[in-house]
Amino acid sequence: MAQNHYAVLGVSQNASPEEIKKAYRRLAREHHPDTNQRGGSSGDRFKEVTHAYEVLSDPAKRHRYDTFGDERAADGGFGDFGGLSDLFSSFFGGAGQGGAARGTGRGADLLAEVELTLEEASMGVEREVSISTLDGCTECGGSGSAPGTWPSPCSECEGTGQVQQVRRTIFGNVMTASTCRRCRGAGEVILDPCPRCAGKGRVAIDQSLTVSVPPGVEDGAQLRVSGRGEAGMRGGRKGDLYVAIRIAPHEIFRRAGEDLGCEVPIPMTVAALGGTVDIPTLDGHESVEVAPGTQSGEVVRLAAKGMPRLGGRARGELVAWLRVVTPTGLDDEQSELLGRFARLRDEPAGGRGLFGKIKEVFH
């Protein structure tokens, strides 16, 4: 025979909600397995107290219990036959309720973004990242229960997180297992929620952390920082933080993997006579000798002057495209000298020139 819930809590049938709550708190502290050393009898007693409070603290369940006086009425009742959806759920895996495993679940992952210069990506750098996240509640230690109280085993699933039922169908009796709707698969319920986190076991916070970016990282890469995402519900483990890397465009260099490229202008006189050209690199300028008669578009390659290989010591190369610059803004003396140079090479400036010679050939 089912026990009288009022007798279990030691209150009268006319007890107010506050009296019921006060009685439950006293008995829960007395019989909770974590604080009581009397073994199994205490655990059974704690379940009885918890179940009685669950019924009497819910106005609708209490009314049904007072009216009908049996457990099925207090729990809402059920029919002999499941619906058509239950029949399909039985044969095709119970997809409707998911059959989730018991537990509080892992917290969500977070994404942050860091922008670097090409020089910072080459050397590696430490950056501070600010994030808004959900962290474990310090008031209740992440349990979700008010200080001095504890989560209670769910009476509907008896702490398993799943509810099993045998349904009569046209094919015979079929057993189904579904996620407990009351505790949502956790196996526990919060009867006295923590006032700070409202029973969630976590609160919203803003925090900063330092992220180490390794040398050679590429634009669009993501760095994973384990355990720095959101805390799980009611003590569940934390998710991860992913830091997306963005590398700002550089005014000189273009990147292709581990290699760098740039365009280097050189004076016409150096290109014609040969000489020394300064080529920019991430480590400073590098002096390179060019041969006489160098043309625009010629390439100079500098080994180990590109980007470092991620996770290694080797570096790519720097590829410099030479561009011969035609002088402008000449004064009279410079114009006269270039004119003499052109006449010596039979390249009259302002005269027939090359197109004039081609014209003479056809005439």
Image: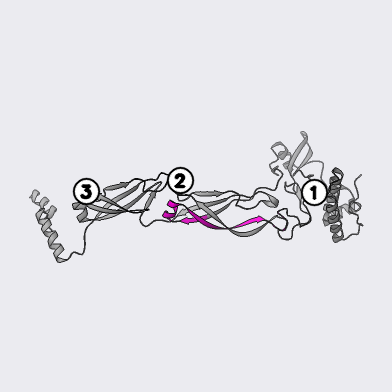
Q: Of the residues shown, which amino acid type is indicated by label 1? A: Asp
Q: Earlier in the sequence, mark 3 or mark 2?
A: 3
In the rendered image, the residue lying farthest to the left is: 363
The total number of labels drawn is: 3
* Few, some or many residues within 10 Å of mark 3 (<14, 14–19, 20+): some
SS of the residue at dot 2? loop
In the rendered image, the residue lying farthest to the bottom is: 332
- Viewer-proximal residue, 355 or 189? 189
Looking at the image, which residue is at 34% across and 45% down? 303
**Magenta segment:** 113-142
Looking at the image, which residue is at 78% across and 40% down? 165
The label number, if any, that marks residue 34 in the structure image:
1
The label number, if any, that marks residue 310 in the structure image:
2
Residue under label 3: 291
Q: Earlier in the sequence, mark 3 or mark 1?
A: 1
Mark 1 to mark 2 CA distance (whole Å): 51 Å
Q: Of the residues shown, which amino acid type is indicated by label 2? A: Leu
